[in-house]
Image (cartoon, helix red, strand yellow):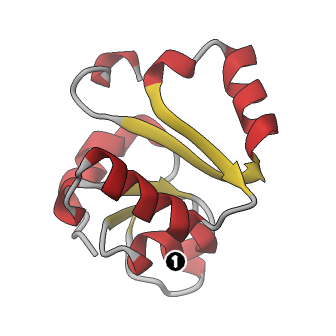
């Protein structure tokens, strides 16, 4: 994250309750890396839309990195790119750029097609 701080804007959009997610981020001392830390009860699709509107991002400028179908669905609902983490998407036959962990993220983002 530190290598990309200032190069990209990052937000957390989680299914974990928002207060709990904020506590986790604070406890890990990584809050400075994120513009937003958002969690349940709203859907990931709603939060993506909120972030797009709040910061004036256009869908081709935004990439969602996630490991759950709700992440993929939130990206698709908003026409933004998606990079999958883990094997879930390959196992389900969903054609996304996928990485085993975040080490290859920047290269994967260049390959992923928006929306």
Residue that protrudes farthest toward the bottom in the picture: 93
Q: Position of residue 44 (x, y in %)?
A: 57, 64
Q: Nearer the viewer, residue 28 or 43?
A: 43
- Is residue 84 visible from the viewing direction of this image? no
Residue 67 against residue 2 in the figure, above or below: below
Dot 1 corresponds to which residue? 73
Query: Which picture quadrant has residue 98?
Result: bottom left
Question: Up-down: is 108 above or below 34?
Answer: below
What residue lies at 75% left-to-right and 27% top-to-bottom? 24
Across and down, in percent, residue 69 comes to 61, 74
Q: Quadrant of the N terminus?
A: top left
Q: Quadrant of the C terminus?
A: bottom left
Vertically, is 60 above or below 73? above
Specify few, some or many for label 1: CA neighbours under 10 Å numbering under 14, 14-19, or 20 or more: some
Residue at 42% x, 79% y: name it: 77
The secondary element bearing badge 1 is classed as helix
Query: For residue 10, what is the image quadrant?
Result: top left
**Which residue is more in the foreground, 6 or 101?**
6
Q: Residue at x 19, y 54 (%)?
A: 61
Q: Is residue 92 above or below residue 115?
A: below
The answer to whether 29 appears left or right of 99 in the picture is: right
Residue 39 in the image: x percent, y percent? 68, 50
Q: Is residue 26 visible?
A: yes
Residue placed farthest to the front in the image? 54
Residue shown at 24%/46% (left/top)? 107
Observer-nearest of 27 and 47: 47
| Horizontal side, residue 13 vs residue 58: left or right | right
Total numbered badges shown on the rendered structure? 1
């Amino acid at each position: 994250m530190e290598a990309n701080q200032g190069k990209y804007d990052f937000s957390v959009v989680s299914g974990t309750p928002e207060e709990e997610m904020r506590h986790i981020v604070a406890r890990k001392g990584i809050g400075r890396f994120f513009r937003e830390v958002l969690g349940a009860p709203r859907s990931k699709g709603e939060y993506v839309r909120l972030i797009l509107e709040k910061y004036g991002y256009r869908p081709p400028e935004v990439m969602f990195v996630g490991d759950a179908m709700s992440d993929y669905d939130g990206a698709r609902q908003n026409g933004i790119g998606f990079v999958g983490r883990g094997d879930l998407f390959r196992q389900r036959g969903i054609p996304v750029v996928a990485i085993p962990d975040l080490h290859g993220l920047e290269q994967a983002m260049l390959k992923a097609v928006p929306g």
